[in-house]
Amino acid sequence: MTLKKTLMGAVLGSLVATGAHAQEPVLNIYNWSDYISPEAVSQFEKETGIRVNYDVYDSNEVLEAKLMSGRSGYDLVVPSAFFLERQIQAGIYAEVDRDQLSNYGNLDAQLLQTVSRNDPNNVHGVPYTWGTTGIGYNVDMVRERVGDMPIDSWDLIFKPELAAKVADCGLAVLDSPAEVVALALNYLGLDPNSESKADLDQAEALLASVQPHIKYFHSSQYISDLANGEICVALGYNGDVLQAQDRAASAGQGISVGYSIPREGSLAWFDLMAIPADAPHPEAAHKFINFVLQPEVAAGISNFVYYAVANTEAQPLLNEDVRSNPGVYPSEEVKAKLFAQNAHTAKFDRLLTRAWTRVKTGR
Amino acid sequence: MNSMSQSAPLAVGRRRPSWLRLPGRLIPGRSLVASVPTLWLGLFFLIPFAVVLKISLAETAIAVPPYTSLFEWDGAVAALSLNLGNYQFLFEDSLYLDAYLNSIKVAAISTLITLIIAFPMAYVIARATPGRRVVLLSLVILPFWTSFLLRVYAWMGFLKKNGVVNDVLLSLGLIDQPLTMLQTDFAVYIGIIYTYLPFMILPLYSALEKLDDSLLEAAEDLGCRPLQRFWLVVVPLSLPGIVAGSLLVFIPAVGEFVIPALLGSSDTLMIGRVLWDEFFLNRDWPMASAVATMMLLFLVVPIMLLRNGQGRKEEAA
């Protein structure tokens, strides 16, 4: 469930808030969990004198629920592009003022072009990082169970015979209906953005057939669980899996974690920094965006979180293990098979979540 | 203070002169005292409930907040549109009924086990010497000094595959494969029973504390065996405590969300999680509100009637 991180964030947030002074300049950021380097925030605070309240979520759905209730109090949020698209329709974002962003030119023009399908003319969002959804796995545990086959297919998760083999060491799946159903549709050879009921039924049947082998649905817990061997396979985000790999390596318990973008193709997603229309400190938010757009800062974040930056100038500054990591920057051949998501209509969303609840509860 | 309330103490123990006997509602101060809980109930229960009820009759919209308004005013005509579709849908999709029933099942089993564990504990505390009693009671209350959330997290640490329980059992050689305890119904029951145990112990304690020893002695003298004495004397006399404790555990357990979310598996279907999903995943506030309203009708109304009936019986007796 997505609750865990949210509640932890709330607890930490309230601890931070009690120390607040009314006059001190403040910036309230609401970002994904494990999605920034700790140095970036403290450096920003030191340079600008603005105190940052940093709060985290682990799903687009939770972010949207908070924003849609109005007066969230956040100055800067980081939704994925296909969620931003619908949120723009609800009028919850202010336009980004590029005059305040002297570093805007560092952004990858091609990437800006890609996300403009969700955010026309890039007026509401500034790309933060992008990534893929794929399979994270414990190399030894999985080999023990399925043999020496390459882990390059969604079969490992979507084929009941294979999923059953890894069920005993723990299979985790993102608690994100929009993404997981899109992946299931793609696996079935259907349009991942389809809103047809018949297609959804097929995807649901596929997911229901592997549900008995799934240990839990959660969107962030798999990071630590992969790292310490609590689970052995996760349908998750590339950077999160690579963070697990990094943690496992530094723990020295002999656990090695791999990441694979299956050959059937997978989701590419883009997270954008956006400023809510009712943000109390929009100027500070612009300052933070401009800060992140600096090549050194962007590279520092990417080196830490293992997600690809949208910043052309930052590329040369990346660590070698990030720049040449096919999990972060896939080859052109793999890239060609990635697909992006569109915003869903409210009507389809209800069908989708209903199907998702049935899948999760095994009914 | 007026002269009437000053003279009132004098009337204690004997009949007041007729000019001093006022109907209860006219005695100044009484309505003031009664208004505090009434105001509390109105502010923190009835008004929020009215808001929930209102949202449950709206439709979802991509807007802030994400539902339509019930009243339309175009300058000349006021229109009120109530959407009952959400309630209709509750009965059409078996998901909701399943979730309600399963929540009631989990809550009922948890309440029963909590009662079985709490009764001897409360009994021992009530029978202890006054000095000991203070210590034991503060031990019952002590866990509240730590956040509920942290305590549930602690259980995750205990129950996980390489957690404390498995480590101990493995090192003792009692098992050779770690047991799967986290993300099971077992863990949910542990979480609920652990969390709500004090809510059962305290009312039981206050009922058992009033238990007159001479009644027990009388029962013994009249030939009751210990077990009989327990069933025929102790249990009936502590019944108010049992009912109060059971309600304090049962009602929040039905709507419990955090414990099944953190300790349970994805197929622990409980109404609290359905609500969360409607609200956060579906962003369907009207549907979530309808689920909440129905939960209130299903659970709270029968319980209120039950309490009311009991109150009358006590008054009659």
Image (cartoon, coloured by chain):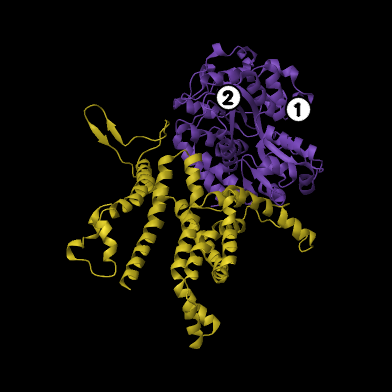
Chain colours: A purple, B yellow
Q: B207 above or below A178?
A: below
The mark tally for this picture is 2
Q: For residue B244, which quarter of the picture?
A: bottom left
Residue situated in front as seen by the camera: B151 or A212: B151
- The three-letter amino acid code for the residue at tag 1 is Asn
User: Quarter holding the N terminus of chain A?
Assistant: top right
Label 1: how many residues lie within 10 Å, few (<14), some (14-19) or many (20+)?
Answer: some
Residue B137 placed where, x, y %? Answer: 56, 62
Residue situated in front as seen by the camera: A82 or A205: A82
Q: A21 above or below A216?
A: above
- The three-letter amino acid code for the residue at tag 2 is Leu
Q: Is residue B91 visible?
A: no
- Residue tagged 1: A325
Q: B240 above or below A152?
A: below
The answer to whether A132 appears left or right of A227 in the picture is left
Cα separation between marks 2 and 1: 23 Å
- Residue tagged 2: A272
Q: Is circle 2 on the same chain as circle 1?
A: yes
Q: Earlier in the sequence, mark 2 or mark 1?
A: 2
Residue B179 placed where, x, y %? Answer: 71, 57
Residue B217 placed where, x, y %? Answer: 50, 83
Select label 2 or label 1 by which is in front.
Answer: 2
Helix, strand or loop at label 1? It is: loop
Helix, strand or loop at label 2? It is: strand
Label 2: how many residues lie within 10 Å, few (<14), some (14-19) or many (20+)?
Answer: many
Query: Which residue is drawn at the image coordinates 73% and 25% (left, top)?
Result: A331
Residue situated in front as seen by the camera: A37 or A198: A37
Query: Which residue is drawn at the image coordinates 20% and 62% (left, top)?
Result: B20
Instruction: Please tell me the numbered disc located at residue A91.
Output: none
